[in-house]
Image: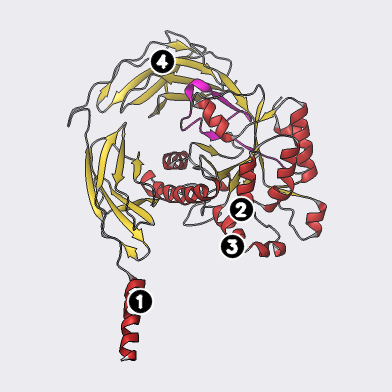
């Protein structure tokens, strides 16, 4: 009898341990709001993660687009086109498995009414600002679902040549003839309709507020003591004494360090900007930041933005004792949280798991040849979601900035990462990002796919610091 009772207890225990997979989601809705699809669902007590899929018009199968935490109940899908039915399905992932999926659909109309396309209005150029000596920023009053053809001429009544077609109401016109105050006109295009050309406006028309921000890029900070202990002096390392000299020079010459969050706020119309701002950025999250750079930032009352490689930080956190045997030790999440809480160092992303020089035909967080936005966007969204989970856990904030691994990027990858949730992207030292070494911004133009990509100069050991700051 005792054996039978014990067997029954074992069966009950196994049944409880195994449990049932989560129930199917009870509600899933999709609505069109401000040119994007907002998907909402009801919270489930069984959920550890919500997994969302999308099937776009003309696609045969669903594609993964997002994993969210158990406390999230919505997702904004900006990757849609005018016209067609979009299908979404949601699964609940719990401790005991994956639920059945719940589906929802939304028809995105061609125009304001099904099947109708309204003619665009005559475009209005709101400002033409010389951002720096190389680039002019042309801003246009935005219209829904339009692309814009930007044209320029050396004279008001001359022949206007097409410069670019953009889906944003901005043109960043970089050209070799920097001494010409160009005239610009714009045409709006919606479907088969093309507006008349706007009134011409010359460079300087209602010019916006221009400000410049040098952006420096560091990686590792070492002393002779570190080298004697087995720390490697890699290609992008600098001595801590060099970093201290850099901070002293900046302070002596009137520079004020800012965070990336401050820059984002200012471009969004909030806060103020010091007379001579500088953005100090550090990549990877090596232990030398905690041990060498952070004390110097505190000493000189300066700030820096630290871009973290998620999987490297996970490894260091899970095996902190192994750092004593490593040539390139990383910080733990707890050490990073301590620095973030201090206010001297803000945490940004260097991707969670994209920091590999070669993987799946891609380099770092950039696209590969043949990629479309539909191919790459789910990759960016998944990595952003994983990064956001760590940032919420350890820093109680959302990640706003991503630094490109190896400084490799494309315009397509920019679009994907910005659609995923980042607001600012740190690129490398390339004239394809900005002809001027200092990043210049037009505040009134705000953040867009062009202004959100920042040129950075990699600080190398043994070189004069003044080579990195335009005077």
Which is nearer the N-term, disc 2 or disc 3?
3
Residue 454 belongs to the span the image colors magenta: yes
Looking at the image, residue 247 lies above or below residue 152: below
User: Badge 4, how many Cα within 10 Å: few under 14, some, many 20+?
Assistant: many
Q: Residue 211 at x, y = what percent?
A: 59, 22
Please say if the residues under marks 2 and 3 sit with CB atoms less than 8 Å apart. no
Instruction: Select label 4 or label 2 by which is in front.
Output: 2
**Alpha carbon separation for disc pair 3 and 4:** 55 Å
Instruction: Select label 3 or label 4 by which is in front.
Output: 3
Looking at the image, which residue is at 62% across and 55% down? 332
Looking at the image, residue 111 lies above or below residue 38: above
Q: Quick check: 49 left or right of 463? A: left
**Alpha carbon separation for disc pair 2 and 3:** 11 Å
Tag count: 4
What kind of secondary structure does the magenta stretch mostly adopt? loop
Residue 161 appears in which quarter of the rendering? top left
Instruction: Select label 1 or label 4 by which is in front.
Output: 1
Residue linked to disc 1: 13
Residue linked to disc 2: 334
Q: Quadrant of the N terminus?
A: bottom left
Residue 364 belongs to the span the image colors magenta: no
Instruction: Select label 1 or label 3 by which is in front.
Output: 1
**Alpha carbon separation for disc pair 1 and 2:** 37 Å
Looking at the image, residue 153 lies above or below residue 33: above
Which is nearer the N-term, disc 1 or disc 4?
1
Provide the residue span drawn in magenta. Answer: 432-460
User: Badge 3, how many Cα within 10 Å: few under 14, some, many 20+?
Assistant: few
Please say if the residues under marks 1 and 2 sit with CB atoms less than 8 Å apart. no
Question: In the rendering, which numbered label is found on residue 318?
Answer: 3
Which is nearer the N-term, disc 1 or disc 2?
1
């Amino acid at each position: 009898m005792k054996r039978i009772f014990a067997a029954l207890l074992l069966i009950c225990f196994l049944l409880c341990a195994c449990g049932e997979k989560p129930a199917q989601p009870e509600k899933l809705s999709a609505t069109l709001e401000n040119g994007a699809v907002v998907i909402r669902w009801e919270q489930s007590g069984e959920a550890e993660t919500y997994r969302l899929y999308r099937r776009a018009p003309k696609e045969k199968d669903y594609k993964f687009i997002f994993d969210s935490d158990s406390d999230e109940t919505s997702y904004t899908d900006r990757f849609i086109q005018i016209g067609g039915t979009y299908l979404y399905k949601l699964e609940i992932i719990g401790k005991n498995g994956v639920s059945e999926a719940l589906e929802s659909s939304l028809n995105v109309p061609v125009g304001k009414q099904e099947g109708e396309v309204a003619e665009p209005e005559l475009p209005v150029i709101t400002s033409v600002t010389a951002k720096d000596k190389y680039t002019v920023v042309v801003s246009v009053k935005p219209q829904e679902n339009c692309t814009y053809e930007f044209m320029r001429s050396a004279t008001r009544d001359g022949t206007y040549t097409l410069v670019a077609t953009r889906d944003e109401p901005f043109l960043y016109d970089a050209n070799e003839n920097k001494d010409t105050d160009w005239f610009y006109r714009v045409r709006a295009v919606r479907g088969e309709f093309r507006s008349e050309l706007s009134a011409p406006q010359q460079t300087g028309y209602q010019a916006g507020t221009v400000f410049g921000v040098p952006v420096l890029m560091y990686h590792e900070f070492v002393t002779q003591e570190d080298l004697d202990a087995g720390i490697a002096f890699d290609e992008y390392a600098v001595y801590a004494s060099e970093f201290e000299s850099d901070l002293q020079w900046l302070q002596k010459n009137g520079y004020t360090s800012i965070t990336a969050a401050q820059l984002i706020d200012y471009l969004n119309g909030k806060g103020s900007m010091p007379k001579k701002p500088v953005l100090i950025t550090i990549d990877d999250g090596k232990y030398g930041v905690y041990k060498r750079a952070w004390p110097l930032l505190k000493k000189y009352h300066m700030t820096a933005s630290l871009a973290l490689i998620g999987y490297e930080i996970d490894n260091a956190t899970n095996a902190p004792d192994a750092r004593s045997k490593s040539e390139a030790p990383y910080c733990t999440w707890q050490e990073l949280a301590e620095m973030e809480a201090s206010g001297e160092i803000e945490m940004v992303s260097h991707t969670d798991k994209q920091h590999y020089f070669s993987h799946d035909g891609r380099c770092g967080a950039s696209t590969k040849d043949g990629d479309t936005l539909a191919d790459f966007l789910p990759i960016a969204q998944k990595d952003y979601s994983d990064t956001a989970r760590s940032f919420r856990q350890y820093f109680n904030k959302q990640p706003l900035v991503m630094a490109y691994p190896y400084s490799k990027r494309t315009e397509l990858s920019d679009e994907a990462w910005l659609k995923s949730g980042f607001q600012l992207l740190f690129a490398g030292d390339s004239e394809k990002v900005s002809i001027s070494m200092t990043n210049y911004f037009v505040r009134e133009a705000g953040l867009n796919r062009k202004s959100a990509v920042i040129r950075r100069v990699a600080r190398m050991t043994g070189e004069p610091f003044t080579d990195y700051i335009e005077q």
